[in-house]
Amino acid sequence: MMLERRQWAFAGGSALVILSILLMFLWSWPGATGLGWPEAIDVAGQERVPLAPYSAVYMDTARRTTPEALLDRDPPDFVELDSRSFNQGMSPGVLWVAFALQELDARPRLLSLDNPLFDSVTLFAQEEGGQWREVPRHQAVAWDQQRRPAWRHVFHIEADSPASRYLLRVETGQNLRFHAEIQTFEGHQAQATRFWLAQGGYHGIILALAVYNLFLLFSLRDASYAWYIAFILSTAGYFLFQRGVHLEFFPEWGSQTTQLLMFLCVALLSTFALQFTRRFLLMRRRDPDWDRWLRAALPLPLAGILLHVWLGTAGSVLFFSLVALAVIVLVVGASLRAYHLHDFRPALYLLLAWAAMFVGALLFVLGALGILPNNLITYYAVQVGSALETMLLSLALADRIRELQSEREILVRRGDQLERSTLLDDLTGLYNRRHLDRCFPDLVARAHSLGSPLSVAVIDADNFKQVNDVHGHAVGDQVLIRMGQVMADSVRRGDMVCRYGGEEFVVLMPGADEAMAGEIAERLRRAVASQPQPLGETSIRQTVSIGLATLQAEESADSLFLRADKALYEAKSGGKDRVVG
Ligand SMILES: Nc1nc2c(ncn2[C@@H]2O[C@H](COP(=O)(O)OP(=O)(O)OP(=O)(O)O)[C@@H](O)[C@H]2O)c(=O)[nH]1
């Protein structure tokens, strides 16, 4: 019984929700209406007046080309739109904007649209007799000083014969979003100047950073610089085409070519962003799991270009929006992982860079949706975000080099330590036999080539077995350590003292002839004998026997060593605690 009541409640609730959605849908469904004219705009004394608040907007899915054809239908079949922000997303038809103008003041006016990428934009004015005529396009002076129709959809509203009613027709296969203003010539000029300043500033920053990082690429030979340059150039390319900068120089390119170039730039910048992130964060080595996802996403942008013809403009916009979203999720995820999981500090700059771009895009979208005012800040927000992103990425690269260098230094230091530890004797800290074997032949060769003397002493502790037997191995070790210190202190700087093994030592004396070597060896013998190893109340006096030999002409290292060893044998058999050589 309980279960049944619950089922009823569930069904009732669902029905209520579905009903309210249906009602909301019907409520918001725009009905067909006749063409209504909004209140006439009074532009007198104003430099720039936005058109949106003073206009009525209609969607004509039959895509009629003239006002006569549009108004001919009875009952009318076009639909009045609620929005006054000229932002319809992907357009299902032709947008008609109706507005009326009050008598103009003495200054001529222009109607200017900020989006240059529409397929066709026409302005119609109603004559006294009721018939419609096409308003001529504004002839602008281009970069080559030639006058030609403005590429930015600008219409010349004649001052002497102001028509009271106007119809603006906008047709496009892409996003139907624009901002329109009625401007004086001066207002128009000021806007154009600001536009070129902003574009010049943005592309200047990108170019400067591209050149700077190109130098770094050549000197550091790190592929992440190449991917960075490719990424910022394709991003700049996107803005160049999106803003219509190229149309100033190539007005014949038109909206279709521009659209394709924009898709190409988005595909390239997505690919380069992925590659840059993979390389920058050394993902193949440090985060292979996440790297697999980035690699899997790599072919997507290219596929979008290949599928472009089949997808059409609307499909391509959707496809590339999804690709861009996937790329953002992947690169932000990779940066977060690098920072949090692997403590890679440069990833923080990367995150800041993506955040700058994201905030810029958000402001732009909010401006476009009419949630924020559609002003200079929101209009240029993406480009400002992109410029900030570019600079932060450049900082990220610098920080990364510093981080990698310090990592490398630690490795080198560790390597040095390792290298040193393989050359030194564990017990005494003197050089070990391996180092002696490596250096001895080199020193002999150098002595021969320079004609300088070289002597070698082979030293053996006397009766050392007794020390071990009487006092134990640990005390024996202490005696060996102390002997090593005393020997190292007794020789000259540049002489090399090695522990050859057990209680046997070797001293190489470059530059020491027979006499000098004898002096050094005698000093060493005396020093060892006169500095006993303290042991509780008493001490252990240790002596050494030394065999000496000095390099002869063309003698080999082996022969020199053998002679010194023989001399040691003589010193031992001669009574120990002496130098023979
Ligand atoms: N404590 C200690 N003893 C060592 C070490 N290496 C070798 N010995 C000892 O040194 C002693 C060498 O003894 P022998 O070769 O008989 O020579 P000796 O007693 O010094 O006699 P002579 O060389 O003839 O004067 C042995 O008892 C070895 O165990 C070491 O690293 N530590």
Image (cartoon, grey):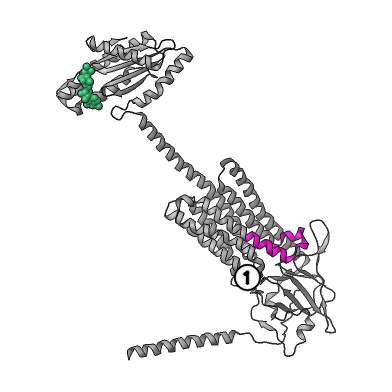
Disc 1 target residue: 315
Q: With respect to residue 555, does 212 lie above or below?
A: below
Q: Look at the image and tell me in which quarter the C terminus lies.
A: top left
Q: Main secondary structure of the magenta part?
A: helix
Place residue 114 in its image quadrant. Answer: bottom right
Q: Position of residue 406 (x, y in %)?
A: 46, 42
Q: With respect to residue 568, does 234 lie above or below?
A: below
Locate residue 560 relative to residue 86 in the image: left or right.
Answer: left
Q: Position of residue 184 (x, y in %)?
A: 77, 68
Residue 248 magenta: yes
Locate residue 249 relative to residue 298 in the image: left or right.
Answer: right
Place residue 47 in its image quadrant. Answer: bottom right
Q: Position of residue 314 (x, y in %)?
A: 64, 71
Span colored in magenta? 243-266
From this viewpoint, is residue 327 visible? yes
Residue 369 magenta: no
Residue found 49% across the figure and 57% down from its top: 292
From this viewpoint, is residue 355 visible? no
Q: With respect to residue 283, does 572 lie above or below?
A: above
Q: Look at the image and tell me in which quarter the N terminus lies.
A: bottom left
Badge 1 local density, few (<14 within 10 Å), some, or many (20+)?
A: some
Q: Secondary structure at mark 1?
A: helix
Locate residue 274 relative to residue 1 in the image: left or right.
Answer: right
